[in-house]
Amino acid sequence: MSDQPVPARPGRHRSEASRMAILTAAYELTAELGYAGLTIEGIAARSGAGKQTIYRWWPSKADVLLDALATKADLYVPIPDTGVYRQDLHDFLEASLALGRRQPVIDALRALMAQAQLDEDFGRRFREKFLQRRRDALAVLVERARDRGDLPPSPPAKAIPEIVFGMTWYRLLATREPLDSHLIDTLLGLLAPAGPDTRSTP
Amino acid sequence: MSDQPVPARPGRHRSEASRMAILTAAYELTAELGYAGLTIEGIAARSGAGKQTIYRWWPSKADVLLDALATKADLYVPIPDTGVYRQDLHDFLEASLALGRRQPVIDALRALMAQAQLDEDFGRRFREKFLQRRRDALAVLVERARDRGDLPPSPPAKAIPEIVFGMTWYRLLATREPLDSHLIDTLLGLLAPAGPDTRSTP
Amino acid sequence: MSDQPVPARPGRHRSEASRMAILTAAYELTAELGYAGLTIEGIAARSGAGKQTIYRWWPSKADVLLDALATKADLYVPIPDTGVYRQDLHDFLEASLALGRRQPVIDALRALMAQAQLDEDFGRRFREKFLQRRRDALAVLVERARDRGDLPPSPPAKAIPEIVFGMTWYRLLATREPLDSHLIDTLLGLLAPAGPDTRSTP
Amino acid sequence: MSDQPVPARPGRHRSEASRMAILTAAYELTAELGYAGLTIEGIAARSGAGKQTIYRWWPSKADVLLDALATKADLYVPIPDTGVYRQDLHDFLEASLALGRRQPVIDALRALMAQAQLDEDFGRRFREKFLQRRRDALAVLVERARDRGDLPPSPPAKAIPEIVFGMTWYRLLATREPLDSHLIDTLLGLLAPAGPDTRSTP
DNA sequence: GGATAAACGAGACGGTACGTCCAGTCTTGCC
DNA sequence: GGCAAGACTGGACGTACCGTCTCGTTTATCC
């Protein structure tokens, strides 16, 4: 039990005010200057914090931004459960892509994915703390459909997240086309074709 | 005719030796140190060129690496033309993914895609000079199949490159799983299901 | 009272060790390579300091050298007060020219005077922090003689420093002849002829 | 006889047009940007000459400027011969200091004297081709006076040029005071006091 | 309530790479 | 062979941040 923090240590405690000021500064600076213009010194200056305080709590500026994104922009997407795979999938995509239509969020996500390629350590954290979680959420959906017998035989379950997130990220990173309803339609068409209900035909 | 360059300009001409030394150095250093460890100064030092010479001909180190990749690693993938869409697609994927199985090429591509997110100008060049060309090649294939009546009605033609390159890049950038034959099978299953020939069955 | 510094500012304080290492390096490098071979990068490398640290505290390499000269070579010349103008003048010249007989000091002074011509800002500082102070010291001597009635009517007081420092610097910069005792004799002959004591003859 | 150039060498001859364009450019650029802003590249660009042409005919930019000064500003000072030392000296000083009242000439001279300290080779040329010649001119005057018995016993002949040029250069380099008539008066008072004619006393 | 401990803002420190400037040299093709 | 054009290696510039390290101060717990 005792999940309570129990910070029974002596000494001054972490300042929540500093934490928020730093995350806010990081988020704003990214929006204003782009991730390339984001620096630890800049965050420290804008937030009024010392550089040491930032280095004490985050391993890199990308981690600060990832934290800021999770704190400032609510990245939580609920896992729908309507009892119908196609409907669940639709709701999940709708909610996910809605996030990806807010410009500051887009910019931050692109930057974080980029940084994940350049910094091995951050890459690991990004994949575990962000990418994997999105796949897990989708997996829950798929799992439920499979248990229900509601899952189309094709494509293979393993391919589903690759198709969903692959197409989404490719738009974000490569074509820069908006994550619009056409994309949802295409994905639904690929993963859960409507027509004669997939389940039917007894 | 006379398409020969005829560089009748005065002044010393660009040194091909320097150009190659720079590209070689960039390629090697990326392989040895990773893109994060690649610096203009490092390229200059290893190649024996002056920094000015690099800045004179390339706008950024990412452009040097892109050029090096095109020159050192042959990125050219022929457009197959077997008369059968499924076969063409298979050959195209096979050749494309073969590139993506060579570690230095993988590392460089990941870094370039990352850099394209961080540097607006390079991003534009990368999309035009690299990403768009890959899509164009695939488009030729699809176009020919359509003319032949060989193209499945689903998915929509516009989605084909997004599926192919989306899944491929997602593996490179996010899951880091190898670009193996399973991926090809999945893609073929999605885009050109085999079984009873799509065209046939009169 | 309490004129003690009390550097109650927050933040790390200036490192005296760095300061001395930089001045020492500057002085040595000038002696070894000449002023033309003195570079900020060289000073940083030899002293083990970062370039930024040098730029933080000195506006130019000439200022570093001037500071080094004042610190390493003691440029201080006491103002003699024997009660006799001719004797005071002699002692002052003797001490001043002694400095100008040490080769590293000569080289540095020539370089600083040169730099003062090429860099307007440094020129101002050099005149105020060095040249003017030498003139002031001489002026004290002259002033005391005048009050005593010990000052020859010719040349005019205003011309005295111009004669003393003009001839001295001209030797340093133009003829490169040593600052020997003949120069002192000539100057004494011009400014305070011996023979029948100027004051005496009742 | 044949003092004519006899440039019987093959190949194209030196272009006088280029030479003048280079000297003009050097002179103008020094006036506009100061000597610190004078570069070989700048001279080449403004004059329309190639850098190679400049390097072919002058050892350094200081030599170009010295040449420009001699060509563009007439530095020639006639040696007066009135039969009276004091008068000769007055005329010589008047003509010499007149040169030093033209701002571009002052700036150039200060820069050249500075460069002579920093560049050993140029320093040698500057002393021989410029400084020594001024001393020689004055020496002629003094020589004639001595032969005439017109020379005051003090100061010693050797010191005369040191006093004249020392005080002049000190004003140029150190105090920056104008080379006005007071300076001439002071110099005359030191070197050839008027009062009862020095020659007289039958 | 005094000692101890940790986090805090501030800011100097040694480093590394940046992108620029200019030096002085080396081709080119023209005159 | 001189000339303008211009690319070449090389080296220093002054700047920007990095990540680390004191400082003096503030806030907490412990004895």
Image: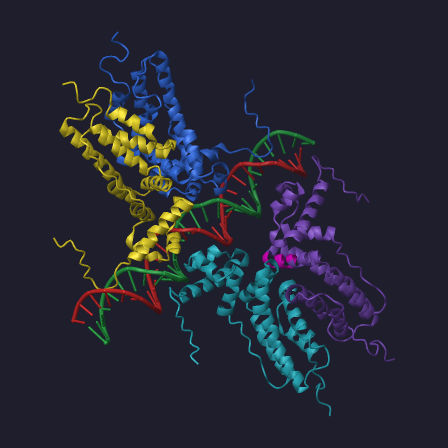
Chain colours: A yellow, B blue, C cyan, D purple, E green, F red
The image shows a total of numbered marks equal to 0
Give yes or no for residue D179 being in the magenta stretch: no
Drawn side of residue A114 relative to residue D134, left or right = left
Question: Could you say where residue D147 lies in the image, as x and y percent from the top left?
Answer: 82, 69
Residue A9, percent across and down? 20, 62
View extreme (left): residue: A1
State the image quarter where residue B10 is shown. Answer: top right
Say if the magenta span includes residue D116. yes
The answer to whether residue B102 is visible is no
Say above or below: C195 vs D88: below
Which secondary structure type mostly characterizes the magenta part of the structure?
A: helix
Range covered by the magenta-colored residues: D111-118
- Residue B47 picture location, percent across and down: 43, 39
Instruction: Tell me the quarter of the picture where residue F23 sits.
Output: bottom left
For the C terminus of chain A, the quadrant is top left
Q: State the residue lying farthest toward the top.
A: B202
Q: Please give left or right for residue D6 compared with residue C164 in the image.
A: right
Residue closest to the eye, A81 or A25 = A81
Q: In front here: D155 or C108?
A: C108
